[in-house]
Amino acid sequence: MPPYVAREASKVPFYKTFYEIYRRIVMETIVEWPLLLEKWRFLLFGLVFQYFHGVAARIAHYLHRPGPILHDLGFDLLPELGPEKAWISETVFTFIFTTFVLWTFHPFVFNNKRFYTVYLWYRVLAMLVIAQTMRIVSFLVTQLPGPNYHCREGSAAATLDPPKHISEVLLLNFPYGVIYGCGDLIFSSHMTFALTFVHTYARYGSKTWIKRAAWVLVVVQSLLIVASRKHYTVDVVIAWFVVILLFNYVGRKFYDPELMDRSPLRDQILPMNRKDGRNKDEMQKMVNGNSGYAGGDGRQRTPTNGKILDDERSPKTLEVLVNGSL
């Protein structure tokens, strides 16, 4: 019996790996580019709306009047972290935000796509715009005394002098004005973002353990926000209600059947320009093999999924194999 000689696993040269990543990025860009041309107006609006949301929060700071902290059950149950540990909740939120953004663009590097990135961000931004509009109305019509340390009575940052020029409002005093804002309480903006991102991954992600970990992390985020006294408990609770209900609404209102279907054949025919004569529903039927349209001859076409179809004009049943042969 010849002796067994162990061999090292073959290593892929670095330049080949780099080329494959580059090729993947180029191919994915070709697929996503027509979608971006179709949705770019709303995507741009959603990004610009983040600035409007910041301006509204700045106005809320001008309207803020510090006062005694309201009684809060969450404050009674959760120990106060103190200003020196306020960074903990911000670190958790930054981790959720960063990992979600990276995940939405991972199909440009890894070949395990389940969604179109443009359509995904279209839905996420639609969700955020609706939620933030409701939030702006909420914190502008009712001003609560801020529980955060820099928003309490005696703090120099609790109130702002009336603006002398419109630029003081529009420029947001970034980043100081964003970090040390007051008055924009109902409901929590951090929770709105975190819950939207976690809901999105729970629906379109593929790793079960990541979904479970994400839900645990967002619960921890909720507790940390209250323990850091950045929001009242009601601000966090309302954010949970609003995001859950809005996510279901947006899922029905802005439904895109292509979002979850990324078979190779669909990547060849989708996305379509809306100016095309045949709409996307017809293309979906053609892919599934149940469309009456097939080059104008009115016959049913062989499906790509290997299902069995009956030809009404023939008494025989056509058994269609995966390779398309009879």
Image (cartoon, helix red, strand yellow):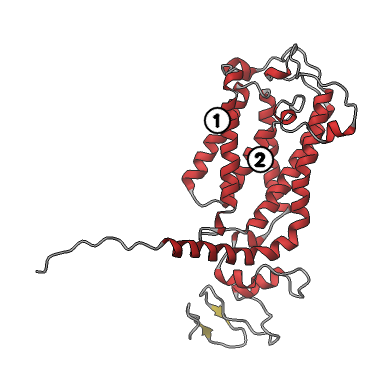
Give the structural element (helix, strand or loop) at label 1: helix
Q: Along the horizontal axis of the image, is 44 left or right of 211?
A: right
Q: Please, what is the three-letter code of the amino acid marked with disc 1? A: Val
Other residues around mark 2 within 10 Å, as few (<14) / some (14–19) / many (≥20): some
Q: Which of 259/11 is in front? A: 11
Above or below, 326 relative to 81: below
Q: Please, what is the three-letter code of the amino acid marked with disc 2? A: Ile
When asked about the image quadrant of residue 134, the answer is top right
When asked about the image quadrant of residue 280, the answer is bottom right
Q: Residue drawn 21% across and 61% down?
A: 6
Q: Decide if residue 147 is in sight here.
A: no
Are the two marked residues, 1 and 2, in contact with CB atoms closer than 8 angstroms?
A: no
Q: Name the residue beneath numbered marker 2.
A: 244
Identify the mark at residue 37; answer none if there is no mark.
none
State the image coordinates of residue 183 (x, y, percent, origin top left).
Answer: 77, 25
Q: Residue drawn 49% across and 65% down?
A: 19
Q: Earlier in the sequence, mark 1 or mark 2?
A: 1
State the image coordinates of residue 255 (x, y, percent, origin top left).
Answer: 69, 56
Q: Name the residue beneath numbered marker 1.
A: 220
Q: Residue drawn 59% across and 26% down?
A: 87
Q: Decide if residue 26 is in sight here.
A: yes
Q: Quadrant where the N terminus lies?
A: bottom left
Distance from disc 1 to disc 2, alpha carbons, whole Å, reads 17 Å
In this view, the mark in front (1 or 2): 1
Above or below, 167 relative to 71: below
